[in-house]
Image (tube, coloured by chain):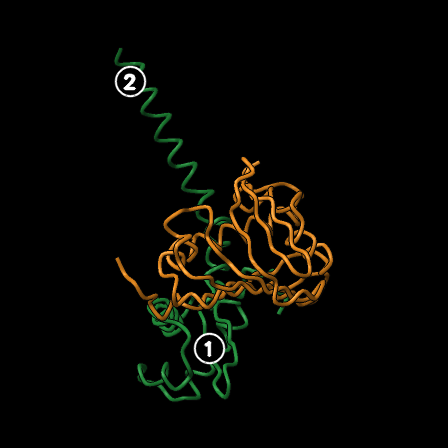
Amino acid sequence: MSTTTPTHLATQVYQIFIKATPEQLWDAITKPEFTARYFHGARITVTPDHYESLGPDDAVWGDAGVEVFDPPRKLVHGWRSMYDPTLNEESESRVTWEIEPDEDGVCKLTVTHDRLEGAPRTAESVSGEGWMGVISGLKTLLETGRPMNG
Amino acid sequence: MSGMDDDEVFKALADPTRRHLLDRLFARDRRTLTELESELEMSRFGVMKHLRVLERAGLVVTRRSGREKLHYLNPVPIRLIHDRWIDKYTERQVSALADLKAELEENAS
């Protein structure tokens, strides 16, 4: 088992274009009724000073501070993988959501998960399919009004 | 870029040097132009040109870190192409084979 995160996983960047307004995107990221439909069923509530994620059974999946709360442009919050006891032992990392309006009613969303140096197993588990599944689900929800597999 | 356009992604992928660059970034991203250039038999200008095409297609995202411009691989457009163009067709093949199996087994019994 590795104790340090491979360099290429310590900072992960995912970018996607979504046909939605910045406000719609912001709501979809910060309100539980939306997140439940694309984020593994997690009900996520973000306020200016607190990030909370609850599983479908009300188990606490995430509980962290909010560093930047600038609707509808930028959100930076802490990340602890509380949904998995082994991952939860690792140190806190950070997730940044940036929303930039593009052409034709499309927004560019960039998700950066960094400070993963002390969380190698979290880095591994969220990489690739992890974040990609979440943000492509977010795109499907906003563009079609339906969750990915619903 | 429009950002909603598969054409840019297909165009970006239709070149061996750009696919090689993506593979290099897949192995390890967060790299400067100088690092990427040192691994390719190509001028700095040539590498820049290819990186620009990849960036336009959204396959490469750059971030500033102090004085450095770092290049990250963004796998999302490939995933979307996969969902749109590959899943759909392989699914039908798989289910056609499953149907064939069911039919053959039914006839055999």
Q: Nearer the viewer, residue A1 or B56?
A: A1
Find numbered disc 2 in the image and state the secondary structure of the residue it sits on: helix
Residue A125 sits above or below residue A94 on the image:
above
Residue at position x 68%, y 56% in the image: A47
Judging from the image, what is the letter of the chain drawn in green?
B
Chain A: drawing colour: orange
Q: Kindly indicate the quadrant of the structure image that contains residue A23.
A: bottom right
Amino acid identity at mark 2: Glu
State the residue position of label 2.
B105
Q: Kindly indicate the quadrant of the structure image that contains residue A98.
A: bottom right
Q: Which mark is residue B51?
A: 1
What is the chain letter for disc 2? B
Q: Position of residue A116 (x, y in %)?
A: 42, 65
Q: CA distance from mark 1 to mark 2?
A: 53 Å
Residue at position x 30%, y 20% in the image: B104
Q: Position of residue A75 (x, y in %)?
A: 63, 64
Count of numbered circles in the view: 2
Residue A35 sits above or below residue A1 on the image:
above
Q: Nearer the viewer, residue A115 or B83?
A: A115
* Quadrant in the picture for the C terminus of chain B: top left
